[in-house]
């Protein structure tokens, strides 16, 4: 999966993530989404790079699905039949850069080598229920995130239905389905990633995506 045609990421998809914002807003009616470039993600075992432009590198452990069968306007009841595989994503983010734009987070989500994907593509036939998957994130062995897809506001089947309404999903497209509560930005003070840290994202049945953090060479 060297160069997927599309990498679609979902924001604020777990109920407690919405509550983390403490702005009194109701749960959203529709998913929030943005795109990532392939170059923003490295493979399992490769270093995630902290750029010189910002110290606010953060982790976001996520479950991603890889489309296997193309489709448009896919009903949620058939969504699972379009999924070829699952994998793990560390949807690395530069927090100050996501605030540069008035309406989007593209800049802070697309620094080169700021996130990761892997370690394997686990075939979807090993996961009979996409609504009951667990994802956990550890930093230097400390558990930071732990939740299940049962607590998503927009389950995977709903995401596939929604996305395929306005764009054709093609084989190899990646949908990263959102991160649970517990990212570094939510601590007081924030706990940004620094060189030497090791981030592990685990999805049972898929494996553990493990990456160290290094400063990007100048």
Image: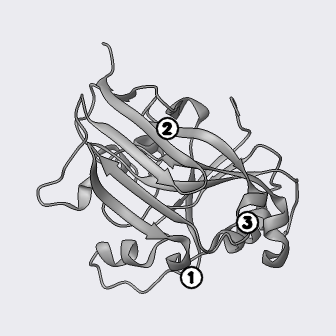
Instruction: Identify the residue under disc 3.
Output: 160
The x and y percentages for residue 215 are: 28, 23
Q: Residue at x 74, y 69 (%)?
A: 128
Identify whether 25 is placed above or below 53.
below
**Relative to 75, does residue 64 appear above or below in the rendering?**
above
Is 97 situated left or right of 110 in this image? left
Residue 114, image x and y in percent?
42, 34
Q: Which disc is residue 29 wearing?
A: 1
> What's the distance in space between the residues labelled 1 and 3, CA to CA?
15 Å
**First-in-chain label (1 vs 3):** 1
Q: Name the N-terminal-most of marks 1 and 2.
A: 1
Say which mark, if any, is on residue 137. Answer: none
Give the quarter of the image for residue 16: bottom left
Q: Which residue is mark 2?
A: 116
Left or right: residue 154 compared with residue 124: left
Give the quarter of the figure containing the C terminus.
top left
Quick one: SS at disc 3? helix
């Amino acid at each position: 999966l060297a160069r997927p045609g599309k990498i679609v990421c979902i924001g604020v998809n777990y109920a407690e993530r919405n509550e983390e914002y403490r702005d009194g807003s109701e749960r959203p009616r529709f998913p929030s989404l943005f795109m990532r470039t392939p170059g923003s993600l490295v493979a399992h075992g490769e270093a995630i790079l902290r750029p010189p432009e910002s110290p606010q590198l953060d982790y976001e452990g996520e479950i991603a699905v890889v489309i296997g069968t193309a489709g448009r306007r896919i009903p949620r009841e058939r969504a699972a039949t379009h999924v070829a595989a699952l994998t793990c994503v560390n949807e690395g983010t530069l927090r100050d850069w996501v605030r540069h734009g008035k309406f989007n987070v593209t800049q802070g989500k697309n620094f080169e080598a700021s996130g990761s994907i892997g370690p394997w593509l686990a075939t979807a036939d090993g996961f009979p229920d996409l609504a009951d998957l667990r994802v956990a994130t550890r930093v230097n062995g400390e558990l930071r995130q732990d939740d299940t897809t049962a607590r998503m506001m927009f389950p995977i089947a709903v995401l596939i239905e929604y996305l395929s309404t306005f764009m054709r999903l093609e084989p190899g497209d990646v949908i990263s389905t959102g991160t649970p509560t517990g990212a570094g930005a939510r601590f007081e003070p924030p706990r940004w990633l620094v060189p030497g840290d090791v981030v592990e994202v685990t999805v049972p049945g898929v494996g553990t995506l493990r990456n160290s953090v290094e400063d990007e060479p100048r």
